[in-house]
Image (cartoon, helix red, strand yellow):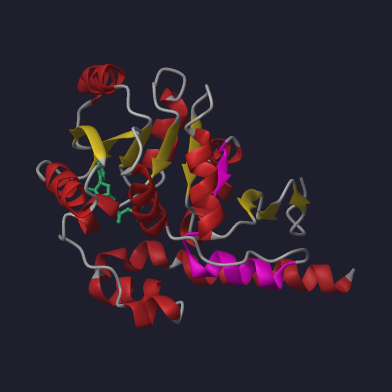
Amino acid sequence: MSKNEAKTIENKINIMDVPVDIITMEEAVSKVMGFFESAECHTVYTPNPEIIMAAQKDKALMKALYRASLIVPDGIGVVLASRLLKGPNLPERVAGFDLVQDLFARMASTDHTVYFLGGAPGVTEEAAAAMGNKYKGLKIVGTDHGYFKEEEEGAVIQRIQEAKPDLLLVGLGAPKQEKWIEKNRGILPAKVCIGVGGSFDVMAGKVKRAPVAFQKLGLEWFYRLITQPTRAKRMLQLPVFAWEVLKLSAKNKDK
Ligand code: UDP
């Protein structure tokens, strides 16, 4: 597929070779609920511009994204890119954290179960306890922190296999979580695996999300930059992404 334009394939838009679903939050939640009824393991990722840039150089990450059942735009930059590139636009930002919250609300009145994998020791359990309190009826069948050694991975996978969750949330940070899910999806019992980044930190109250005003203005990335300055280095990819999109957009106009 050419990188020169945003081609649409089956309700997806190609943003620098990453096929992003043209979907609203509500539709995304329904789609994931539908995945619970299927026999295979579906993967869901929520790339922002940094991840799309990383995928340009990281074949394993691009493969994981390419093979996903659902890709939603976590970053406002991805939505803006779709407006600049040729083809249909992405209707809205679908933040991974919000997608999971809406899913929990729906799952709470069903028998579908969830397992939390990732985050620092202690934080994962706190996140699970907080979500269990917030969404009465949500069935959390296990937790594991994300700082296991290579030789401990087998035991982690075995615990997930025994718990047989319908939904596995993997919060190991990008791109580790995408590659981990892709490597193990064949042996994971879950119907859906979602890469959730630092969501467990937010669920546990360790990290605050940007105020709604920032979110509505599309400035959550800016809030994260000023509150978590350690992210500055990786955020240098944002202007590079914007520049690449502008170049592609100019090329399209010349055609
Ligand atoms: N993390 C983990 N194992 C690791 C590295 C990171 O469980 O080996 C967790 C970390 O504790 C944090 C999350 O992964 O909860 C990464 O958060 P960040 O906000 O950096 O991720 P992003 O949302 O940017 O992918």
Measured as percent of width and height from the top left, residue 42 is found at: 51, 32
Query: Which residue occupies 47% across, 32% down?
Result: 36
In the foreground, 142 or 86: 142
Residue extending furthest left? 122
Q: Quadrant of residue 210?
A: bottom left
Of the 4 image quadrants, the one containing the N terminus is: top right
Query: Which residue occupies 21% across, 45% down?
Result: 119
Magenta span covers which residues? Answer: 68-85
Instruction: Determine whether 60 is above or below 30 in the image.
Output: above
Residue extending furthest right? 255
Residue 53 horizontal side relative to residue 192, left or right: right
Query: Does residue 92 belong to the magenta stretch?
Result: no
Measured as percent of width and height from the top left, residue 133 is found at: 16, 51
Residue 74 horizontal side relative to residue 213, left or right: right
Of the 4 image quadrants, the one containing the C terminus is: bottom right
Residue 122 horizontal side relative to residue 34, left or right: left
Query: Does residue 70 belong to the magenta stretch?
Result: yes
Task: Count all numbered tags in the image, as a single digit.
Answer: 0
Query: Which residue occupies 68% across, 72% down?
Result: 83
Query: Which residue occupies 49% across, 42% down?
Result: 32
Measured as percent of width and height from the top left, residue 12 is found at: 68, 51
Instruction: Determine whether 36 is above or below 241 in the image.
Output: above
Residue 197 horizontal side relative to residue 30, left or right: left
Instruction: Determine whether 66 is above or below 30 in the image.
Output: above
Q: Quadrant of residue 253?
A: bottom right
